[in-house]
Each structure stands twice: as C-alpha cells, then as structure tokens.
Image: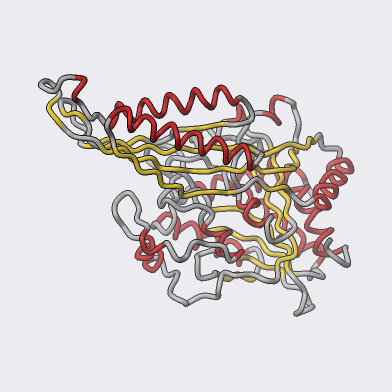
Amino acid sequence: MNIADLQQQAEEMVEWLAAYGADPEGGVTRLLYTSSWIEAQQAMDRKMRAMGLDTYYDDAGNLFGRIASEDPEAGTILTGSHVDTVKCGGKYDGAFGIIAGLLALRYLKETYGPPKRNIEVVSLCEEEGSRFPLTFWGSTNITGTAPTDHIAQIRDSEGIPFVEAMNKAGFGLGHYRSPLRKDILSFIELHIEQGAILEREQTTIGIVEQIVGQKRLTIECSGEANHAGTTPMGWRKDALRGASQMIVAIMEAADRRGAPLVATVGKIEVEPNVSNVIPDKAAFTLDIRHPQGDVLDAFCEEAVAICFAAAQDRGLQVKVNQHLDVRPVGMDASLLRSIETICQAQGLPYRLMPSGAGHDAQIMAAHYPTSLIFVPSHRGISHNPAEYTSKEDLAAGVQVLIRLLYELGYEKETIS
C-alpha cells in the first residue's frame, strides 16, 4: 500500500464530500432528509459503485456498500459513520468514518478478493439531532430501538413534520428493505477525536474503552408578558429571568460535582423576544454527560429539582421534556486488544481513552461487538468549520481499519 497515495485519497475525498452541503456561512450543513443530505447520499452511492461495491439503501435512509462473501450464510462486518452534520459543521465529523470505510473496502477487494464474511461500509442517515429533536436515527433503526411510535409528533424548527420530510426524501414508505439487521457480527467506527488529547500527547490513534452516557432535556418556562416600563420588579412573572436563575444554579451544581461530569446549555429561545416586553416564555436545552450511569441520573434529578424550585420562587410554570437518555457503554474487549496489537505492529503511537462525545458506536455496542477508533483533531475543535485532521493522521486511521477489517473478514474463523 502506497501511504502517500492513501493520504492524498483520504484528503481529496473529505473535500469532495464537503461540497455537498457547503454552507455560505462556512462549514458544511447536511441536515437529515434535506436536499443537501439527499445529494450527499446519492453521490456516495455513485462513488461506492464506482469503487466496485454493491450498494443498497434501507427504509430509514441508511446507505450501504458491500463486498459480498461467497458464503450466502456468512454474517457481516460493518464499518462506517454518519453523513449528517450540525449546522455549519466541519468536514470530518462522521464523514471521515464513511470515507475511511470506503477506502478500506476498495483496498481489500482489489487486494484479496471476496472475504469469508461480508464486509460493508455504511453511510448512516442521522446521528446529530440537528434538525429534529431525535438522535441516532440511523443506528437505532438498524438495532431495532428507534422511537418509531413518537415520530408522528416530531417537527423541525420550521414546523415540518418528521414523517413528511422522511417520505418526501423517499424513505419510510416501504420502498427499501427493513433497516433491522440480524446478520451483523461486529461494528467498527473510525472517527475524529473531537477533543485535543491525542494531538497534545502526540498520539496517532485513540482506542476508546468507554463512551459516556448522556441526557438531553428541554426546559420550558411560562410566565406573563407585560410592559417593561410599568411593571414593578416584584410583580413580574419573567420567564427569562427564571430560566436564567435555573441555568446559573445548574452550572454551579455542575462545578461542585467536578470532572468528568459536564453540563451544557446550548440553545435558548425567548418569546415574544421584544426589547420592551417582559418575556412570558423561555426555553433552553440542557445536555448532561458522565461515564457513570448512577452519577448521570443523580445530577439530572438535581437539575430538574433546581428548575422547579426556581419556577416556584418566580411564580412561573415549568415543563421538563427529556428527549435523549443514552447509557454509558463499554467497547468490546476482544476488538480493543486486536486494535492494540495492530497499532504495535504498525509502529503507531496509541492510547486507551474514553469518549466524551456520543457516537453511533454506543447504540451498536448494546447489540454487536463494537469498537470506536479515534484520530487526532487539531486543537480539539469540532462542530465548527475550523475542524481539521492532517492527511497523515487520516491515512494512519485507514491503515488500522484496513488491518482490522482484514482480520475480521478474511482471517478469523469465528468472531468472539
């Protein structure tokens, strides 16, 4: 394998995919079932077929490229990541895992021919939750854990129903195969770190041992709109002031808990959002993460209690909606040891580490042996147009993936 060629191919394909959804404000915006998302999946379909893979969609919109085994009963080794982005996101988040899988499968097919087990790369339809209050739509459909009973009530910020958007994109209509998979033997996700640890430690590969649990909530405060000049401070039912009190108290509670717990308020909405009117509605999101489930649960309960206490203090009504509850999950120990051995054999500096970000690997890990592999992110910047990983690190990640897929797809008689 020519490393220089692999570096160039990885870098060029990152730029190629980033053109689909290139945002005038900077970065890449590919939200689930939008035109840019459709164009990206269709372009990836063409690219997979041009590289000699058999392609197909499932009815959620996940796209697969396959090297088929000669054994029709053989299971499947699956690799890949998500094609959707946050608004004005980076070029590498999710996209690199798909590109790496595609490069790895092309090399394996050209070099070794048909494998003992099917090997597939997947371009998962959604992971971020950027358009709808829903995350991991791609991987939860594959594992049979998607919240299908609730999607009829879900709308995006423009009021477009989830089901309408899905159907308009051509999915959810029964035209494609069911997303549920029973044949997957292992899932491997290669991803940028989205943190600064690997770069600061001058380490090329991160082997994830555990992905933190996370909860996402939306807190809605309701008060009374009134004149900003004629309503005394003590008589007000100011929804924004109440929400502000909640946010400060929750952040202070997170500070007291200390690392590794993190809590983030990322979005605030206010009504009527006029300079001379006391707000009667204020809503904010709350993202809480920790590697221990009991600590995560306890802090979430504390945060909710803070909100109700502040609402009572301010004469407000409060509603708490939890729309994500993902438990901490460990990666497969056998795959972890295999990746360590590969890094040692290839002379690549590596470290074992947790992931503070959520990934499709945590959904898959509850159902299949799963591993998550990181390559460095420059300055730890992600979800940002400045997101960057060097071509040398991209190629190193692909090298590790190629070897691992070869062992799982071509060499080993059984998958433990």
Looking at the image, which is closer to me, 87 or 99? 87
Tally of numbered discs:
0
**Residue 90, position as x, y percentages in the image:** 51, 40
> In the rendered view, would you say 72 is above or below 254?
below
Looking at the image, which is closer to me, 144 or 40? 144
Residue 10 in the figure: left or right of residue 335: left
Query: Which color scheme does this rendered protein use?
Result: secondary structure
**Residue 277, position as x, y percentages in the image:** 16, 29
> In the rendered view, would you say 284 is above or below 76?
above
Q: Quadrant of residue 267?
A: top left
Q: Residue furthest bottom?
A: 72
Q: Quadrant of residue 186?
A: bottom right
Which residue sits at x=59%, y=39%?
Answer: 296
Residue 157 is at least partly visible in this image: yes
Residue 4 is at least partly visible in this image: no
Residue 298 in the figure: left or right of residue 2: left
**Residue 79, position as x, y percentages in the image:** 68, 57
| Quadrant for the C terminus in the image | bottom right
> In the rendered view, would you say 208 is above or below 105?
above
Q: Residue furthest left?
A: 230
Looking at the image, which is closer to me, 21 or 242? 242
Q: Quadrant of residue 26?
A: top left
Which residue sits at x=54%, y=70%?
Answer: 58
